[in-house]
Image (spheres, rainbow, N blue to C red):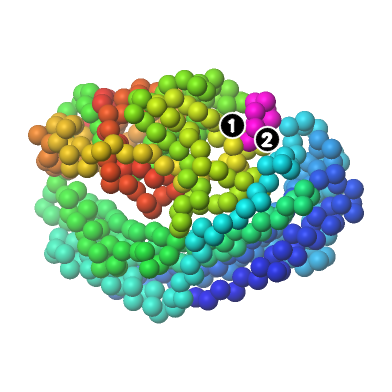
Amino acid sequence: MTNSVNPAALQRAAEMVLEQAKQQGATASEAGVSHSKGLSVTVRQGDVETLEYNNDTSLGLTVYFGDSKASASTSDLSEQAIKDAVTAACGIAKHTEEDACAGLADKALMATDFPDLSTYHPWDVTAEQAIEIATECEQAGFDVDKRISNSEGGSVSSHQGERIYANSHGFMGSSTGTRHSVSCTLISEDDKGMQRDYWYDLARDAKDLDAAKLIGQRAAENTLNRLNPQTVTTGHYPVVFAADIAPTLFGQFISAIRGSALYRQSSFLVDHLGKQIFPDFMHIHEQPHLIKGLGSASFDSEGVATTPRDVIRDGVLQCYVLDSYSARKLNMTTTGNAGGTHNLTIEHSDISFDEMLKQMDTGVLVTETMGMGVNILTGDYSQGAAGFWVEKGEIQYAIDEFTIASNLGDMFMGIEALADNIETRSSTRTGAVWINNMMVAS
């Protein structure tokens, strides 16, 4: 799959937006123009089930008339289409309510340095090659054990794109990125029933992906390990969140310190800046300039320069997660997080995953959570889960159809350790997390 992105066309489209907006009387304007293309293949039981290509272009723009604003979008980058989109936005803006917090990010905060973060590695893979890889991945899973009775498929995807962001401060920045993945989902069966599980790998550079055969084998092992699940006795236990689902736990933390939740007073962490919310050994920070990082970027979606920064140091909340609008609502300054965090890194304890289980001795290892039972306003946490019962520091058997419950504040303060098996397939980088006490109900 070769690169057909035309950076010059994207840049010209952004320039036309700014020119048209100025001609039509806007006091400020911004535009984001992107092009992406990709290939996705799924093979199920040796047959091609899906083969999809995408080739998409989009333009989003916002115009400001003083403190009034309006937005428009189009997938047509022709001069007339862009003019029409700007005209439509300008017409709407003249009738929208003024908001003193609206506007571009401050000019002084715009990025001026654009290091090569190695986020763009196109994979010249054909559909036929992708089908071969997906087939190899699935077959490797079937070959592990005759109890692997069915499959939801082996899959390969490859996507690449470029985005131009420009605004009337004179800022124009380009970001490029690729994401490639190989995955497999299998079904195992014995006389006690059927179980489903999966494995995958994801990377900016296809050369960094695990071999398809290994991914299929890991999917099979995960699926087999879930056979013959037992029930857990309801009670309070230590709980370990496996590394591949632990990012969701810290995702709840970020949601609770996001500016939009704070100025609406809809977070249990309102007014917690400078307060301890994690144990004093905890260190959480952003690393936006990691080479090949899935969350790496030199500027956010408003053009604000990204910088490494501590979010939690010694367990204490150092800053919120703000874009320009929410920062103004809170009488603060943007943290360069318009569009999200950039490689949120949770530093691990000096402990392996196996040693963590040994130290926990008896408790629950959670490998999957289900449902929407998290209330950011109150911090109440209740999720359906599946995983394993741990006793004498060893995994004993699979357990499923249970619920884990607590309060996020108690869970954060109750973290005992973080294992060194860092999850790199996410822009939130953490190992397994051991929480000292949660309600577990069958």
- The residue wearing badge 2 is 325
Tell me: residue 412, above or below residue 12. Answer: above
Q: Position of residue 280 (x, y in %)?
A: 36, 25
In the image, taking residue 313 as reference, residue 151 lies left or right, namely left
Q: How many numbered tags mark residues here?
A: 2
Which secondary structure lies at badge 1? helix
Residue 39 appearing in the image? no
In the image, taking residue 254 as reference, residue 174 lies left or right, namely right
Instruction: Name the residue located 84 percent from the left edge and 57 percent from the top edge.
Output: 19
Which secondary structure lies at badge 2? helix
Tell me: residue 51, above or below residue 302. Answer: below
Quadrant housing residue 221: bottom left
What's under tag 2, amino acid-wise? Tyr
Tell whether label 2 touches label 1 (CB within 8 Å): yes
In the rendered image, residue 329 lying in the magenta stretch gets the answer yes
- Chain part drawn in magenta: 327-334
